[in-house]
Amino acid sequence: MTDEQKQQIKSENDQLINQKGFRVNNWLPILDTPKLRTVEEIKGRMSVMNAMINIAFEAPTYIIDEWIKAQKLTVFLSDSEQQILAKENEELTEEEINSLMWYLEALWALMWLAQMVDKLDAEKHVGDNMASLLPNLEDGDTNEKLDNIQEIRPELEIYTMLDYYYRLHWYCVDERLNGREPKLNEGQVYERRKALEWAFNRSNDWDDVEMGT
């Protein structure tokens, strides 16, 4: 992907954001994008997140830990996720539980990336069909639904969506810093951008994704 292509994508996204009534920053640069992660890495991250979300809904940590091990997904756990799994539920902090709840939005972005859903509208929350598309651990499902993913969207399409969310994230942060209420949910925009940033940067662990604006 050339800088000229990226510059064109920036211009088109700025125009789209303007049309939706959100402010843009013409000085915001184009993004650096190292090589995309492999399909296996992306499936692994999605699988772990889908499992960990259950803890936010009071599933016992030891049950989720056992499921992850049984599905051979331990290698995809981040350091913070391993720390959560090492605790009893009553030992979890409010921050840890909230972070797992936000996984819903990040996972939805990866589901879009993996072609499981058609759209990733910033103005809308996750679809009502989300749970039906994913393994249901409470029902005893294996990880088959995610294991069956064969390919992801083209790099250019993923980059275009990442660039769009990057610019929306700037808008949300700038509104907040200037005492205004953004017209979008900043947390939702942040989590989706984080998922797409992670997919493009192999050097950063899930816990250390660069999210500057």
Image (cartoon, helix red, strand yellow):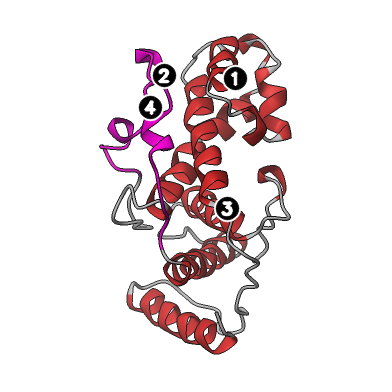
Q: Percent from the top left, x then y, of residue 192?
A: 49, 52
Q: Which residue is mark 3?
A: 194
- Residue holding disc 4: 135
Q: Secondary structure at mark 1?
A: helix
Q: Foreground mark, 3 or 1?
A: 1
Q: Which mark is on residue 69?
A: 1
Q: Are marks 4 and 2 in contact (CB under 8 Å)?
A: yes
- 150 left or right of 93 in image: left
**Picture quadrant of residue 122:** bottom left
Mark closer to the chain start, 4 or 3: 4
- Circle 2 — which element? helix
Q: Which residue is drawn at the image coordinates 72% and 24% (left, top)?
A: 83
Q: Nearer the viewer, residue 138 or 15?
A: 138
Residue type, mark 2 in image: Leu
The N terminus lies in which quarter of the figure?
Answer: bottom right
Q: Please state the extent of the stretch shown in magenta in the rendering.
A: 126-153
Sequence-first tag of 2 and 1: 1
Give the spatial CA distance, label 3 vs label 1: 25 Å
Q: Say above or below: 113 vs 52.
A: below
Q: Which residue is mark 2?
A: 137
On the image, the x and y values in percent for residue 121 come to 34, 58
Q: Characterize the local packing of mark 4: few (<14), some (14-19) or many (20 or more) Cα atoms within 10 angstroms.
A: some
Q: Amino acid at mark 1?
A: Lys
Amino acid tagged 4? Pro
Distance between the alpha carbons at the discs numbered 2 and 1? 13 Å
| Lower sequence index among marks 2 and 3 | 2
Q: Is residue 130 magenta?
A: yes
Residue occupying image coordinates x 57% and y 45%: 41
C-alpha distance separating marks 1 and 4: 15 Å
Circle nearer the N terminus (1, 4): 1
Q: CA distance from mark 4 to mark 3?
A: 23 Å
